Amino acid sequence: MIESEIETSEDLVRDLLREQHPDLAELPIREVAGGWGNQMWRLGDQLAVRMQRMDTSPDLQLKERRWLPTLAARLPLPIPVPLRDGAPSERFPKIWTVMTWVDGTPLDHGSITRGDHAAETLSDFLRALHVEAPTDAPTASDREPGGRCARAGVAVPRGSGVHSSR
């Protein structure tokens, strides 16, 4: 375990739900493999709990809480949407979020069987996503020099569209 990582378990998730969202605490919980900065836990069939694990700041998850609902309303495919906030506590000192679960298979675990349909669907999604951002949208500070990508050694070339002009 890395120094900034917080170990999570099904018992911890259930205890946090009992404390902060007791109406959800008895739903089945199971760990979702993968993730780096956050750990996902399925909560029943419709929900997931996203818990900060590696992130040292709540900023990215707070940004998701604010902007994913706005994006979801504009996109032709479902994306996870935050439904409830989890606050830091003595047992888990970071924020966490209850979100909708988007059912499906990650592409790296499956294959495209309807190529033309998939290409058109992806095109529609990207076209809806690639529009002028709202004036109150945040800058991509995690992509700026010294941000999370830079600290991780990820090269972000100028002119790639990743750097924000805001």
Image: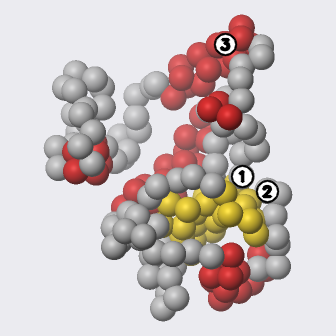
Mark 1 / mark 2, whichever is N-terminal: 2
Mark-to-mark CA distance, 3 and 1: 23 Å
Q: Residues within 10 Å of mark 3 (few under 14, many from 20)?
A: few
Mark-to-mark CA distance, 2 and 3: 27 Å
The reply to whether callout 1 and callout 2 are in contact (CB within 8 Å) is yes
Judge by depth and name the residue closer to the eye, 41 or 73. 41
Residue 101, numbered label: 1
Residue at point 35% right, 40% down? 135
| Mark 3 secondary-structure assignment | helix
Residue at point 45% right, 25% down? 131
Q: Is residue 106 above or below residue 54?
A: above
Residue type indicated by callout 2:
Gln
Q: Is residue 161 visible?
A: yes
Spot the residue most to the top: 116
**Residue 4 locus on image (x, y percent):** 35, 71
The reply to whether callout 2 and callout 3 are in contact (CB within 8 Å) is no
Would you name the residue on which mark 2 appears?
46
| Mark 1 secondary-structure assignment | loop
